[in-house]
Image (tube, grey):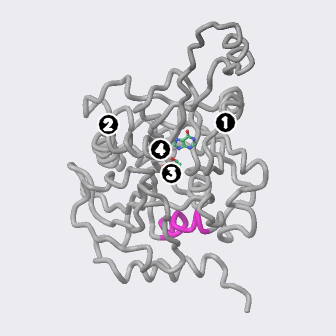
Amino acid sequence: MAPAPIFETIASTVEAIRSQLPDGLKNPRVGIVCGSGLSGLAASMKEVVEVAYDNVPGFAKSTVPGHRSSLAFGFMGDNQRVPVVAMLGRFHPYEGHSLSTVVYPIRVLAALGIKDIIITNAAGALNPEIKVGTVVVVRDHLALPGLAGMNPLLGPTFSSTTPRFLPVSDAYSPALRRLVFLAANELSIPWSDFAEGTYAWVSGPTYETPAEGRFLRAAGADMVGMSTVPEVLAAREAGVGVLVLSLATNMVVIPEKYRSIKEEVEAELLGKKVELPVEEVVSHEEVLLIGRQKGEMMKSLVEKIIDLIPASVRDESQK
Ligand SMILES: O=P(O)(O)O[C@@H]1C[C@H](O)[C@@H](CO)O1
């Protein structure tokens, strides 16, 4: 038997989710995707109902430390009571998930009725001016896997009204990006904690070699990570406004100069004292640590942004 079309499968997933929710939470307005170590972003939600991915048909399970596997529904905001849904844990292609599995939750959130989505991630900084702990408001992306054929929108279109050729030059909503800075100002978060930039998507799970880091930097990327872009594409395909916040959790190791073993051995043979450089490497533990350190700030920021959304983004033409 041929598999059911994706929109039919999504409709039955939506029904299964709604059957586990009280009325007020059945139609969330904003979606949140929590990046590595950032599941605490949803901690300020009120009247929370968690739905485990195990109880959601079509959802996989996250296998990455720092990612949970449930949807949290609740209300957010001080001035408004905005119904939101947060993905506590996402799927990455390197876990062995297909791209359609990776973007399935985003399509389901869109079908549940979200208008905007705040996607967060932990990422490596390629731009030396971006320090660890900075929140980078993403304004563009570079999708090497996508350009090479790994695009989640390959195949039949999502629905009969979905454009076959989706423009993504405007994927990152200026109206939503504005809110980050307005929220930061209201919360008195130092301006220096923020940057704007381009996110390069790589498949992982290996971190970059120095040559790869240099290549991505030369191609115009400020940050590099292993997620987000498939989700952005699926959200835009479904007409959802997108905001991406990348937390710089580490500097990508791009030494100005390679260590020369040849020179070191030569100096040693000549009896000279050789200063050995400290070799830096990235680790997921470091990534999670920065997520924990900045988690509280990110949580307040996301909450404030959500508080500001309905008023400032009401006029769709701003997007
Ligand atoms: O899910 P995100 O993009 O936040 O997680 C990043 C990318 C890898 O999954 C992992 C590497 O440390 O963190």
| Residue at image mark 1 | 209
N-terminal label among 3 and 1: 1
N-terminal label among 3 and 4: 4
Q: What stretch of residues is rendered in magenta?
A: 101-111
Front disc: 4 or 2: 4
Residue 158 rendering spot, x and y as whole percentages? 65, 68
Residue 60 rendering spot, x and y as whole percentages? 52, 72
Specify the amino acid type for callout 4.
Answer: Ala
Front disc: 3 or 4: 4
Locate residue 29: give its quadrant: bottom left
Residue at the image position 63 percent from the left and 50 percent from the top? 204
Q: Is residue 242 magenta?
A: no
N-terminal label among 3 and 2: 2
N-terminal label among 1 and 2: 2
Residue 241 - label: 3
Q: Give the CA distance from mark 4 to mark 2.
A: 20 Å
Q: Residue furthest right?
A: 148
Relative depth, front residue between 202 and 112: 202
